[in-house]
Image (tube, rainbow, N blue to C red):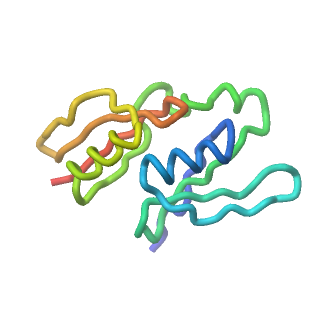
Amino acid sequence: MAHIGLTTLLVRDYDEAIAFYVDAVGFELREDTPRGDGNRWVVVAPRGSRETGLLLARPAKPEQLARIGDQTGGRVGLFLNSDDFEADHRRMTAAGVTFLEEPRHEAYGSVAVFEDLYGNKWDLIQPR
């Protein structure tokens, strides 16, 4: 069966993005390989996940630069599932992650929207 391996996320700077996703969100750095042209192949992923990750990519063209932080037109476009919503929310808040709302408890689970350092919107969610 096929699965989604990586999703590209445009970033201004590799190191600031790595710091945010590893130190604040709690991901692990899976790969950081120089490509010889000043670019790098940088992959971060939630700790323990085996199949999916984010490829952090610097823009190659001006129109890509304009999309940093707005890759989904202002919608929540990324969903971080949690096994312990309260603990993850507390840890991320303490690490400086900006949540745009108080946690909600919906029919589908506990959820709160947060922004990454560029303004991309994420759901931190613990499904029921």
| Percent coordinates x, y for residue 87 in the rendering | 24, 52
Residue drawn at (71%, 58%) of the image: 41
Question: Residue 98: percent from the left, percent from the top?
Answer: 39, 32
Give whichever of 23, 78 is nearer the camera. Answer: 23
96 or 56: nearer the viewer: 96
Query: Residue 43, relative to residue 104: is it above or below?
Result: below
Label total for image: 0
Residue at point 52%, 45% (across, down):
20
Which residue is outermost to the front?
94
Quadrant of residue 110 within the rendered picture: top left
Extreme residue in the right direction: 37
Is 113 left or right of 105, judged from the image as shown? right
- Quadrant holding the N terminus: bottom left
Residue name at image x 48 percent, y 62 percent: 52
Horizontal side, residue 75 vs residue 119: left or right: left
- Residue 21 screen position, x and y as percent: 50, 49
Looking at this rendering, what residue extends furthest in the bottom direction?
Answer: 1
Residue sitting at x 33%, y 32%: 99
Q: Is residue 64 above or below residue 92?
A: above
Question: Quarter of the image containing the C terminus?
Answer: bottom left
Residue 112 image-quadrant placement: top left
